[in-house]
Image (cartoon, rainbow, N blue to C red):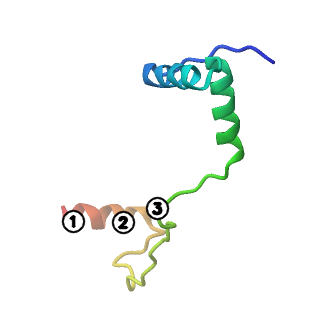
Amino acid sequence: MARTTIDLDPAILRELRRRGQREGKSMGQVASEVLAKALVEPQTSDAPAFEWLSLDLGRPFVDLEDKEAVRSFLDDRS
């Protein structure tokens, strides 16, 4: 098995040690199992899929291709 060094959040390190003691495994074995499982499982989310909302806002007040006209329009509104 390959060896590596990773920086872990202290809470994660405590949980890995706790699980290792509970399961009679080394912290490295537990970390390897958790990582392997996380990398194999598809990513799922309970959040609804994002959808863009597209509405017809009508005709623009200014020619959007003309940057000076846009700048002037915005300056007049402020």
Q: Residue at x 65, y 13 (%)?
A: 5
Report the front residue among 76 and 18: 18
Report the front residue among 22 and 50: 22
Residue at the spot of label 3: 47
- Do the numbered discs 1 and 3 sit on residues whose CB atoms are within 8 Å? no
Quick one: label 2 or label 3, which is nearer the N terminus? 3
Please name the amino acid that badge 2 sits on.
Val
Q: Dot 2: few (<14), some (14–19), or many (≥20) neighbours within 10 Å? A: some
Residue at the spot of label 1: 76
Q: Taking 1 as reference, is 40 left or right?
A: left
Q: Can you tell which of label 2 and label 3 is closer to the viewer?
A: 3
Residue at the spot of label 2: 70
Q: CA distance from mark 2 to mark 3?
A: 38 Å
- Do the numbered discs 2 and 1 sit on residues whose CB atoms are within 8 Å? no
Please name the amino acid that badge 1 sits on.
Asp
In the rendered image, the residue lying farthest to the right is 1
Q: Residue at x 68, y 32 (%)?
A: 33
Please name the amino acid that badge 3 sits on.
Ala
Q: Taking 33 as reference, is 15 left or right?
A: left
Report the front residue among 4 and 13: 13
Quick one: label 2 or label 1, which is nearer the N terminus? 2
Q: CA distance from mark 2 to mark 1?
A: 10 Å
